[in-house]
Image (cartoon, grey):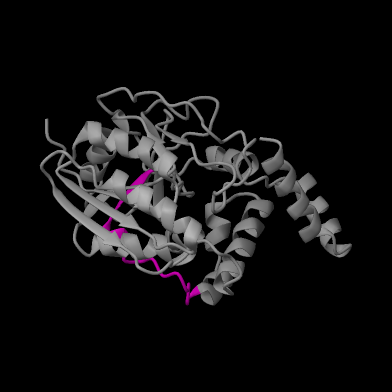
Amino acid sequence: MSFSTPILLIAFNRPVTTAQVFAVIKKLQPDQLFIALDGARNQADQVLCAEVQKIIQAVDWVCDLHYLVQEQNLGVKQAGPTAINWFFDQVEEGIILEDDCLPDLSFFAYCAELLKHYRHDERVWHISGDHFHHHQIGSATYYFSQIPHIWGWATWRRAWRHYDIAMPDFPSFASSQILNQLFPTYLSRLFWLDVFHKNYLGLDNGWDFQWSYALMRHQALAINPNTNLISNIGFGAGAAHASQATSPHANLPTQSISLPIRHPRLIIADKQADEFIMRNNFGVTWHNFFLKHLLRRLGLFDLVKKLYHRFNLNSK
């Protein structure tokens, strides 16, 4: 059976994880496949990127195939958005995977059905494959959230067109009451305001928080499944951000989602589920808040952060 929803694979210099993700895509044999590869930073990267190119060129089925291979290294902050812009210049909707996000095969059908179901619903902008809870949220196959997870996701051109890495309207957002409407707790609102401010000032090297900003700025919704469909196999040395190999979110098991999909009765974010994510994924607690504040007052925050990441990398 053919699979018609376009897929974008974003890769760089990680042949081991890329091979695993690409193997799942080969099982699916999509009709449309887009592959973006960032350029090497140095000679060591050149070897690794060449290995990745061999893997992604092994397309042995008939499909509409597109490559975007950068001659120069764009870096984490630019490579992702550049690839996604290229993707949505050519398609109206699609699925996005990075080279360390290993999907269960049922992830693709789940995304395809929800892309179709919410194609013209401007309230919904994002479909995630990630489930970080220890229990089911509600009685449906998925629930709605204000927080978009990007370890395997899907969206529409109509939503992505609102993405702007520079976040030029952040000052007006910061003075608005939007975060008060989205998050019930002060710490969650403070977290997002701080993260968005740093990205507005260009102090962060990522691109994904700007996507979170786009959703929250327009009070749009993300979909999260009640079954974990993605395992991030890229934690540890060589990861752009997920450097803590001992993270409880590393290598989470996946399972197939039950079909047919059961839709929620109401299209509204589950605030209690979101607050769990704030505590569990982002560490937003009063204990951490006061600890960070104390370390910053003592001028030790950056040092402790570096030592923490070094310990985690060495203990894997």
84 up-or-down from 101: above or below: below
Residue drawn at point x = 68 percent, y = 47 percent: 284
| Quarter of the image with the C terminus in it | top right
Looking at the rendering, the stretch of residues picked out in magenta corresponds to 152-169
Q: Quadrant of the N terminus?
A: top left
- For this orientation, the residue located farthest to the right is 298
Foreground residue among 271 and 66:
66
Image coordinates of residue 6 in percent, x first then y, are: 21, 48
Residue 240: image location, x then y, percent: 54, 53
Q: Is residue 108 left or right of residue 279?
A: left
- Left or right: 149 with respect to 179? left
Q: Is residue 43 visible?
A: yes
Inspect the magenta stretch and tell me whether residue 167 lies in it.
yes
Q: Residue at x 16, y 38 (%)?
A: 3
Camera-nearest residue between 169 and 301? 301
- Residue 128 pos. (x, y %): 39, 42
* Residue 183 included in the magenta stretch of the image: no
- Residue 229, quarter of picture: top left
Residue 61 appears in which quarter of the rendering? top left
Q: Position of residue 13 (x, y in %)?
A: 44, 52
Give the mark count. Answer: 0
Residue 175 shown left or right of residue 77 in the figure = right
Residue for point 28% across, 53% down: 35
Q: Is residue 158 above or below residue 230?
A: below
Query: Residue at the location (77% across, 50% down)?
Result: 307
Given residues 42 and 166, the one toward you in this image is 42
